[in-house]
Structure formats: structure tokens, C-alpha cells
Image (cartoon, helix red, strand yellow):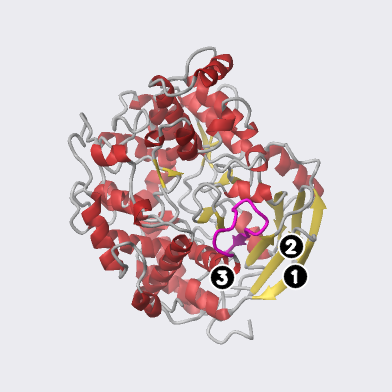
């Protein structure tokens, strides 16, 4: 780190660039200014993607680049220091896709001595890359092609090192499904946006990492003080102290259903009458096995589970909802089995469940052609309909293999619904399926989801916190007043959390000043909460400029027609509609963007973006 003037810790300062076309690699020094401006993780990833790829590239072509990134947090022993980020152009949305995951892969990746691993080109045949203590080797993976995720992980452990960590794809990624995930540590998912398909398009089956290179600390005194504060606040906040530890994310099931904003039957309703069958309490009693936290995490929200026939990880809240209420299903065992199928196949569970629910509505309304209906009847033995438990288990496999009706479901809901002539039945933003919070019940989530740079994702401005959970305070969920400004604050803060590669759940307990104190302690640079938020704003704006470059406009910052025009007819959100356009005008104004959602020259100059 001697060549760095302002950064004294948190990074190795090295990028590994792997050219899969030539099966070669080179090591480059990272520009300190990139780390000063973009931190690492998501921020650094989108900056590299913007600079190193051309506009309009095919996301599944060799010109797309795939970045595995760490942040300054990995290897420092602070809470939630084991995450990592993957960034590429999304084959599902065409946007700048970034997704993070936990487990312990992120620690092994950072321990190799590289902050970033960038994959370019396409191998002529399946390969995997093994990095151990800075040594890089590229191996034939033909024997692994077609294998499920758990088998791949077990085999690669045998071939490399018992302490290695593995990120790989399953059949869904190999078959280039735009809803494919990258899986790490068998059960953890780099989900959303189809990054597994990008990996598959490069014939890259896995990245295997084993490392023990220590992460330097820039200011030990500041770091220790910040670490103490983090542990105290995380240990005292109700959600991070007890609730997530006991129920995981399933603690939200009854809460969101009570608000009448738990999307049911493909967002036709907001209240699921059989909620007790799929609640976190029911899961805890009948399916829970043990907590298995990500490495070094005191929150411990990851739960291992079992059904009468299988065992594994999850489901998480969003997964249980997508295969449960959204599809009209109350069988918790089979919901859990569908979740296991997705983990094995490498499929995003939110997109999979949402696409199946969309297909159920298409089928019930007679919008599927007779040939397709015959195919479904041959597979299921009956017509596809809401409440069809057999369908979620079968199609969570066939999406991965792209067999039968699975080849249509593997498109994702937007493309599938358009294929059958009814795009209005796909509940998505920018092509990415919506999460388990109906914005008709949470108007802050409405503007958050509509403006999200990667599409229908809740994690980049979790307005459910103040609107439903009372963190940091409970606010009126049905008003538009103040929501655009608060959403911007959450978006900017979350951008920095993702770039530090910490868990977003920490924001239930921490504030911008505490994140800034930690970043200052790790890196040894001076930074306060205001500067941290400015860094988040810079990251958000470069993501936006990437999307503008790819042709996205104001019309893409919207919600499905159903959510804008059809109020709920019952439940605690009955009668409420979303007035999105006035909120969108205010949001753009506060962002310093034009009325069409284009960042102004003055805003870009203010943020140091050329």
C-alpha cells in the first residue's frame, strides 16, 4: 500500500483480469482515485463496467464483463464482513446489474490478495478458475457441466482445497436463463438480474478461492472504536438483536400481510387468508433446523431447514412469498422444496415464483394457446392454476433445464407475458420482478421501486423500514409527503453499504455517521457522514447514467399498470392508489435531474462525473 497517499488500509490495491478467450490473466494495480470515489463492491463495479464496456453490448456476448468484487470490510472482523458483490450488464433488464451475497466466499476472495477479479471474453469449453494465495490456474470443467450446485461444490473441494470457497452456476446459468443466479457456498445466492447467465455465457462454471492474505487496517484506534460501536448498536437494536436471529427474514410474513400489502395471486390481492400456514412461527415450529450465520455475523438471519423429504437452506421471506401467497399456495413443505430446487439449479427464487404466478393468471384467464395448454396438461396432469402445489415444485426444476413449459418460464415474467400477448400481467419494473411489498400499501416503496436503477428490487432503498417496521421511526405509509427525499437518502446510503460490502440489515441499527467512522478506521482516510452520502449519490448517478446510455428513459421509472390503476378491494390497504407521477417529478427535482430523469451537467460536475 506504500504507493497510496490517502488510503492506508482496507485494500490490497490489486485487480486480477482473466481473459477466458485466451485462458490467460494479468494483474493490475487499482487506481487509488477509484477507491476514494467509489469505495469498492457495487460502486467500483459499476464504474469499471461503465468505463470498460461499450453502449449496447449483448449481455450474453463475450464483450460483457463480469466483475467479482470485495470492499474494504472483508477480513477486518467487523459485523457482516463476509459479503461480496458481482457486477455485469444484466441479460434480464439491460441495466447495470449488481448483486451481493454472504456466506464465507467473500472472505476467501479477499484473502487471495485481489480486491477485484474481472472476467472477459468466452472460453471455448467449460472452465473453472482457482485462485490460491494469489496463484491463478484455469482448469477444464467439462465434467462439471450440467451438474447441480451442491455436487459441483463437493467435487471442487476435492479437486482444490478443503478450505476453499466456491461460487458457481447450475443448469439455469449454463442454459442462459435470464433469471439464473450465481450460487456460493452451496446455499447462498447472488440473485436478481440474471448474473448466472452471464457466467454461463462465458463458459465459466465456477470461481474457487482460497486465501489468507490479511486486510490492512489504516487507523487501528479509530477502527477499534468503530467496531465497538457497531457491535453495541447491532446488539441493541430489536431487529438485529433478536427478531432476525429467531425467525430470520420470515419474521416479516405476518407483518406485511397484516398491513394488507402482501401480494397474493399475482398482485390481484394484498391479503393471504392462509397466512398461518406459511408464517415464520409455523416455519420455526416445523421446518427450522438451526441458524447458520454468514462468517462473523452476529445478526444470524440465515436458517437451515428440512422437509419430510429433503434439507437445505431457507426459504427466505421473498422466496416463501413468491412460491406461497403470490402463487396462492399454503403448503410450507412444498414451498421449501421449490426453494431447494432453485438453489440446486441456480435460479433466482423471486423471479421464478413471480413468473410461475404470472403464468397461473395467464392460464386461468385463457391467455395461453391450446398447444401450450396441452404441454402443461401433459406435465401436470391438469390445467395450471393458482394454488397448484405440484406446479411450483415441477417448474422450479424445469426452469433450470429449460424443458417443456419451463423454457417459457425461464424467460422471466416480462418476456413470457409479452410472448403470450399480455405484458400487463407481468409484475415487474424494468424487467425485474417485484418483491413481496405491494406499493399500494407502502407509498414510499412505490417511488423506491419505480426509480430503482436495477429494476424491481427492494434492497436499494428499504422504505418498508420506516413505513412498516418503525426503523428508525414509524411514518404514514399512505402519504406521498416527504417520500421522494427520504427515498433518495436511503438509496444513497445503501449504495455505500453495498460498496463497503456489508449487509444491508445493518441499517436497522446504524446511521451514516457510524458507517463513515468505520470506513475512516479501516482506510485511515478522513470521512464523515455527509461525505459518505455524497459517495453514495455519485454511485447512484453513475448507475443512472449507465442506464441512460443503454436507452432507458422516464417511461421505465414506473410501476405495473395494475398497481397504478386498481386499488385493493379489501384488507388494511383497501381503496388506496398510487399517485406516482407527482412523486417522480419531486424525486427528479431533488436529484438535480431533468424532468425526463437525466442527470444535469451541473449535478454530474458536482459529483466529479465527466
Q: Residue at (53%, 60%) from the top-left corner?
A: 81
Cα separation between marks 1 and 3: 18 Å
Mark found first going from the N terminus, 3 or 2: 2
The residue that label 1 is drawn on is 26
Gap between marks 2 and 1, in whole Å? 8 Å
- The answer to whether marks 2 and 1 mark residues whose Cβ atoms lie closer than 8 Å is yes
For disc 2, the neighbor class at 10 Å (few under 14, some 14 to 19, many from 20) is some
Res. 19 mark: 2
Pointer 3: what residue?
Answer: 51
Say whether residue 387 is magenta: no
Asked if one can make out residue 223 in the rendered structure from this viewpoint, the answer is: no
Residue 136: x and y in percent read: 78, 63
SS for tag 1?
Answer: strand
Query: Residue 597 placed where, x, y %?
Result: 34, 62
Asked if residue 55 lies in the magenta stretch, the reply is yes
Question: Which span is picked out in magenta?
Answer: 54-71
Looking at the image, do the residues carrying marks 3 and 2 touch, with CB atoms under 8 Å apart? Answer: no
User: In terms of sequence position, does the residue under pointer 2 or pointer 1 come before the other?
Assistant: 2
Q: Position of residue 124 (x, y in %)?
A: 79, 51
Q: Residue at x 59, y 38 (%)?
A: 343
Judging from the image, what secondary structure is the residue with disc 2 in?
strand
Label pair 1/3, CB-CB below 8 angstroms: no
Reply above or below: 568 against 199: above
- Numbered label tally: 3
Q: Where is residue 276? Give x, y as percent.
A: 35, 26
Query: In which image quadrant can residue 176 be found?
Result: top right
Which is nearer the eye, 400 or 370? Answer: 370
Amino acid at each position: 500500500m506504500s504507493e497510496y497517499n490517502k488510503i492506508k488500509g482496507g485494500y490490497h490495491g490489486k485487480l486480477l483480469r482473466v481473459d477466458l478467450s485466451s485462458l490467460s490473466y494479468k494483474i493490475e494495480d487499482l487506481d487509488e482515485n477509484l477507491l476514494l470515489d467509489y469505495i469498492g463492491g457495487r460502486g467500483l463495479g459499476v464504474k469499471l463496467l461503465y468505463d470498460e464496456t461499450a453502449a449496447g453490448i449483448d449481455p450474453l456476448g463475450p464483450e460483457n464483463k463480469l466483475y467479482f468484487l470485495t470492499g474494504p470490510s472483508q477480513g477486518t472482523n467487523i459485523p457482516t464482513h463476509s459479503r461480496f458483490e458481482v457486477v455485469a450488464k444484466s441479460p434480464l433488464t439491460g441495466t447495470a446489474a449488481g448483486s451481493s451475497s454472504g456466506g464465507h466466499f467473500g472472505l476467501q476472495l479477499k484473502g487471495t490478495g485481489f480486491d477485484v477479479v474481472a472476467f472477459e471474453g468466452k472460453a471455448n469449453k467449460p472452465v473453472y478458475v482457482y485462485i490460491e494465495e494469489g496463484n491463478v490456474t484455469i482448469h477444464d470443467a467439462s465434467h462439471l457441466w450440467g451438474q447441480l450446485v451442491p455436487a459441483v461444490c463437493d467435487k471442487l473441494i476435492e479437486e482444490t482445497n478443503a478450505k476453499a470457497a466456491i461460487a458457481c452456476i447450475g443448469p439455469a446459468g449454463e442454459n442462459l436463463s435470464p433469471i439464473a443466479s450465481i450460487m456460493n457456498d452451496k446455499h447462498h445466492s447472488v440473485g436478481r438480474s440474471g448474473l448466472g447467465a452471464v457466467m454461463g455465457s462465458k463458459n465459466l462454471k465456477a470461481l474457487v478461492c482460497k486465501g489468507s492474505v490479511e486486510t490492512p487496517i489504516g487507523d487501528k484506534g479509530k477502527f477499534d472504536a468503530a467496531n465497538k460501536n457497531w457491535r453495541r448498536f447491532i446488539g441493541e437494536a430489536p431487529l438485529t438483536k433478536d427478531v432476525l436471529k429467531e425467525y430470520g427474514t420470515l419474521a416479516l410474513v405476518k407483518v406485511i400481510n397484516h398491513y394488507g400489502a402482501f401480494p397474493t395471486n399475482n398482485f390481484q390481492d394484498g391479503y393471504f387468508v392462509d397466512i398461518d400456514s406459511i408464517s415464520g412461527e409455523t416455519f420455526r415450529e416445523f421446518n427450522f433446523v438451526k441458524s447458520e450465520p454468514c462468517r462473523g455475523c452476529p445478526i444470524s438471519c440465515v436458517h437451515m431447514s428440512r422437509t419430510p423429504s429433503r434439507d437445505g437452506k431457507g426459504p427466505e421471506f421473498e422466496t416463501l412469498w413468491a412460491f406461497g401467497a403470490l402463487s396462492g399456495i399454503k403448503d410450507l413443505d412444498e414451498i421449501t422444496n421449490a426453494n431447494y430446487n432453485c438453489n440446486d439449479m441456480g435460479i433466482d427464487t423471486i423471479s421464478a415464483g413471480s413468473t410461475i404466478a404470472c403464468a397461473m393468471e395467464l392460464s386461468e384467464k385463457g391467455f395461453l394457446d391450446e398447444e401450450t395448454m396441452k404441454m402443461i396438461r401433459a406435465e401436470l396432469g391438469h390445467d395450471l392454476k393458482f394454488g397448484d402445489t405440484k406446479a411450483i415444485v415441477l417448474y422450479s426444476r424445469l426452469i433450470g433445464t429449460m424443458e417443456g413449459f419451463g423454457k417459457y418460464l425461464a424467460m422471466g415474467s416480462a418476456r413470457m407475458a409479452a410472448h403470450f400477448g399480455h405484458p400487463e400481467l407481468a409484475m415487474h419494473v424494468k424487467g425485474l420482478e417485484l418483491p413481496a411489498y405491494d406499493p399500494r400499501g407502502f407509498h414510499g416503496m412505490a417511488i423506491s421501486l419505480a426509480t430503482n436503477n436495477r429494476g424491481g428490487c427492494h434492497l436499494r432503498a428499504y422504505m418498508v423500514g420506516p413505513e412498516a417496521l418503525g426503523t428508525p421511526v414509524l411514518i404514514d405509509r399512505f402519504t406521498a409527503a416527504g417520500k421522494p427525499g427520504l427515498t433518495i437518502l436511503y438509496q444513497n446510503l445503501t449504495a455505500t453499504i453495498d460498496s463497503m460490502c456489508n449487509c444491508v440489515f445493518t441499517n436497522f441499527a446504524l446511521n451514516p455517521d457510524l458507517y463513515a467512522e468505520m470506513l475512516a478506521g479501516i482506510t485511515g482516510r478522513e470521512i464523515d457522514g455527509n461525505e459518505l452520502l455524497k459517495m453514495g449519490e455519485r454511485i447512484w448517478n453513475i448507475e443512472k447514467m449507465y442506464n441512460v446510455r443503454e436507452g432507458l428513459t422516464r417511461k421505465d421509472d414506473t410501476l405495473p399498470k395494475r398497481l397504478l390503476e386498481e386499488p385493493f378491494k379489501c384488507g388494511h390497504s383497501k381503496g388506496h392508489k398510487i399517485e406516482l407521477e407527482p412523486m417522480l417529478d419531486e424525486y427528479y427535482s431533488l436529484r438535480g435531474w431533468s424532468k425526463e430523469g437525466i442527470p444535469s451537467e451541473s449535478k454530474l460536475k458536482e459529483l466529479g462525473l465527466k
